[in-house]
Image (cartoon, rainbow, N blue to C red):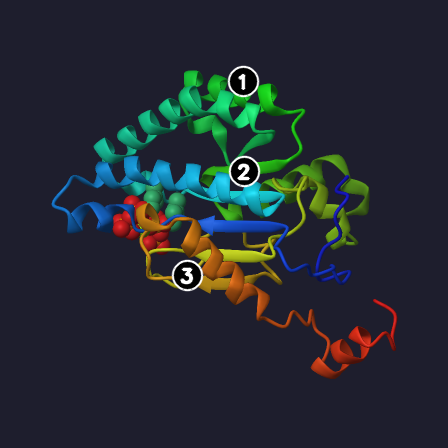
Amino acid sequence: MSIFKSSTREIPRAAAVPRHIAIIMDGNGRWAKKRFLPRFAGHSKGVESVRDMVRACLEKGVAYLTLFAFSSENWRRPQDEVSLLMQLFVKALEQEVERLHSNGVRLRIIGDLSRFDPALQQLIRQGEERTAGNDRLTLTIAANYGGRWDILQAANRLAAEQPEKAGAWEEADLEPYLSMAYAPEPDLFIRTGGEERISNFLLWQLAYSEFYFTETLWPEFGQAALEAAITSYQKRERRFGRTSEQLESELKGNQPHA
Ligand code: IPE
Ligand code: IPE
Ligand code: MG
């Protein structure tokens, strides 16, 4: 069972530092193109930004960082780019897991992993097992992930396990089957690279997240850029369906936190 309540069922407590940041790491190809380099050079450079983000989140006390690395639609890319991305994923797992572990990071991979090479699947399992006991920061990598796939796989499992309740399922019945049931919903969603769309990322979980779009390309997105996103987040008023007046009165202590 998920220990976290849905933002559409209960009002989460909003803190100054987002507890969960989810990022669509976009713009690697354009970063490379600007430098007359092959697209792959951008993906390779993008791994450095991942390292920077993990470090920054550890320093700031962010508890969950979720990164979209490969969408279920990215298989449509040229075969050689897909295969280089897979090699990069293998290399990153081989090189980074020990460092993550020594920094107290728990690694999780979400997505339909069945389509990956068995050797890659094994590296993923090993990385998750090695870091399973850590709790400083949970780093989730979404790979061959799609928000619609996630909702469907959850619905299919719910249907198989609780057929007697069909027709009366509620949000709380579905949630434990979603890929990220172990995490609260993202407070802050960031997309780099200038596009302003979700591209089938966490559809269910982004229901009440704050969105932040930046032109900065992912290989150039560092600690200062993250600070700017968090500063923007801190200026938002998260109403979760209520009015501004209700929030003000609650801040003055006139009303209990519903
Ligand atoms: C994001 O960068 C990385 C992946 C989707 C794997 P892109 O490769 O989409 O970079 P652009 O959007 O072409 O610049
Ligand atoms: C979204 O980026 C997926 C990842 C960053 C992994 P894309 O670059 O594939 O998204 P679209 O196709 O431009 O929407
Ligand atoms: Mg892109």
Taking the image as drawn, is residue 113 in sight? yes
Residue 168: % across, % down:
79, 54
Q: Compare residues 204 and 232 and report the one nearer the observer.
A: 232
In the picture, the quarter occupied by the C terminus is bottom right
Q: Mark 1 points at which residue?
A: 126
Residue 253: % across, % down:
86, 74
In the picture, the quarter occupied by the N terminus is top right
Q: What residue type is labelled 1?
A: Gln
Q: Does the residue labelled 1 lie within 8 Å of ligand 1?
A: no
Q: Which amino acid does label 3 sit on?
A: Arg
Q: Compare residues 146 and 230 and report the one nearer the observer.
A: 230
Q: Which amino acid does label 2 sit on?
A: Thr
Q: Which residue is drawn at 65% across and 69% down?
A: 238
Mark 1, residues whose alpha carbon is within 10 Å: few (<14), some, or many (≥20)?
some
> In the visual, does 187 lie left or right of 195?
right
Q: Which residue is drawn at 80% across and 80% down?
A: 249
Secondary structure type for disc 1 = helix
Q: Which of disc 1 and disc 2 is earlier in sequence?
A: 1
Is 119 rendered above or below residue 153?
Answer: above
Mark 3, residues whose alpha carbon is within 10 Å: few (<14), some, or many (≥20)?
few
Q: Mark 3 points at which residue?
A: 197
Where residue 170 sits, quadrant-wise, is bottom right
Mark 2, residues whose alpha carbon is within 10 Å: few (<14), some, or many (≥20)?
many
Residue 121: % across, % down:
47, 21
- Separation of marks 3 and 1 at Cα, in angstroms: 33 Å
Taking the image as drawn, is residue 65 in sight? no
Q: Which residue is drawn at 62% across and 63% down?
A: 208
Q: Residue at x 60, y 49 (%)?
A: 20
Q: Is mark 3 within 8 Å of ligand 2?
A: yes
Q: Are marks 2 and 3 in contact (CB under 8 Å)?
A: no
Is 103 rendered above or below residue 69?
Answer: above
